[in-house]
Amino acid sequence: QVQLVESGGGLVQAGGSLRLSCAASAFTFSRYVMGWFRQAPGKEREFVAGISWSGGFTSYADSVKGRFTISRDNAKNTLYLQMNSLKPEDTAVYYCAARSGSNYVSVEAMSYDYWGQGTQVTVSS
């Protein structure tokens, strides 16, 4: 059974940092494009960052460029999101997702096949 389990969320002050992790199991992690999405209350789920199979290509939403870094460790079947200079508007539930098929980093949530349960990130002002 495919599992994606996020961890690392929490409460942090504006300007602070958090590192999210997503542990994957029961699928060939290195052959899946991985992504981070987030959803704030009353808003649609939005793309945050994505990474190709080997990690050689990454993509970011404009709102997080220069502050967030996505990475993966295929030997450990783990995806990461380093979040620096956090802002109150980054407050959301963060989800990791896995996309099968081509090595294309899609920004569309509908194109991802598997999802984690989410981890809450709250940034206080």
Image (tube, helix red, strand yellow):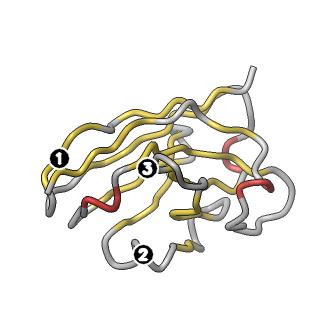
- Compare residues 112 and 38 and report the one nearer the observer: 38
Q: Amino acid at mark 1?
A: Val
Question: Which mark identifies residue 63?
Answer: 2
Disc on the earlier residue, 3 or 1 = 1
Q: Residues within 10 Å of mark 2 (few under 14, many from 20)?
A: few
* Left or right: 43 as drawn, with respect to 19: right
The span from disc 3 to disc 1 (Cα, nearest Å) is 18 Å
Q: Are marks 3 and 2 in contact (CB under 8 Å)?
A: no
Is 36 above or below relative to 105?
above
Name the residue at the top extreme.
Answer: 1
Question: Which mark identifies residue 103?
Answer: none
The span from disc 2 to disc 1 (Cα, nearest Å) is 18 Å
* Left or right: 1 as drawn, with respect to 90: right
Disc on the earlier residue, 2 or 1 = 1
The span from disc 3 to disc 2 (Cα, nearest Å) is 18 Å
Question: Which mark identifies residue 12?
Answer: 1
Q: Residues within 10 Å of mark 3 (few under 14, many from 20)?
A: many
Circle 2 sits in a helix, a strand or a loop, which is it? Answer: loop
